[in-house]
Amino acid sequence: MSDHSKAPVAPVEAYEPPYYVAVFTAVRTQDQSGYSETNARMEDLVKDVPGFLGMDHAQTPGGLSITVGYFRDTDALTEWRSNAEHGAAQKRGQVEWYQSYTLHVAKVERSHGFKRT
């Protein structure tokens, strides 16, 4: 995962539904050679997808990591899923970086947020 400690700590804002989330939950292997660079590249690539709304990351001390990507519509999800460079990174992840993972895609029907001012 890229170093998010320099980014402001705030969740992706609540958008007007409907929109979609892709929830990627993983346990990584010991050898993470090349992971950070590839992850940073994927973060740069996904930002160019029309309809990409943002992403949140979290990791437990035990090694479970969660990335949630937010997308305006299924066209945006399809564009991201069919990106050739993303597909190559997925294959490399299965071979090298992930012990296990799950991907859940869901339609958001309700969303709200709070921010202390």
Image (tube, rainbow, N blue to C red):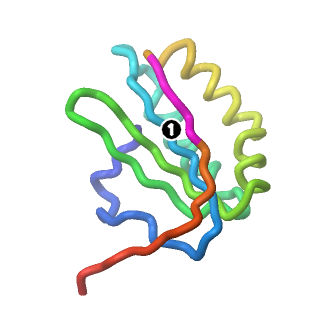
Q: Quadrant of the C terminus?
A: bottom left
Image coords of residue 52 (percent x, y): 64, 60
Is residue 102 located in the magenta-colored stretch of the structure? yes
Residue positioned 53% across, 60% down in the render = 54
> Going by the image, does 49 lie left or right of 116?
right
Seen in the picture, residue 112 relative to 72 is either above or below; the reply is below
- What secondary structure is marked by label 1? strand
> Going by the image, does 92 lie left or right of 64?
right
Count of marks, rendered view: 1
Seen in the picture, residue 51 relative to 39 is either above or below; the reply is below
Is residue 85 located in the magenta-colored stretch of the structure? no
> Going by the image, does 18 lie left or right of 5?
right
Name the amino acid type tagged 1. Answer: Phe
Q: Which residue is mark 1?
A: 24
Nearest the viewer among 18 and 95 is 18
Q: Quadrant of the N terminus?
A: top left
**Residues shaded magenta:** 100-104
Nearest the viewer among 33 and 50 is 50
For this orientation, the residue located farthest to the bottom is: 117
Residue positioned 77% across, 47% down in the render = 78
Nearest the viewer among 26 and 4 is 26
Image coords of residue 36 (percent x, y): 44, 34
Q: Main secondary structure of the magenta part?
A: strand
Q: Sort mark 1 into few (<14), some (14-19) or many (20+) by Cα contacts within 10 Å.
A: some
Image coords of residue 102 (percent x, y): 52, 29
> Going by the image, does 57 lie left or right of 52?
left
Residue positioned 44% across, 74% down in the render = 112
Residue positioned 55% across, 22% down in the render = 93
Corner quadrant of residue 27 = top left
Nearest the viewer among 115 and 7 is 115
For this orientation, the residue located farthest to the front is: 109
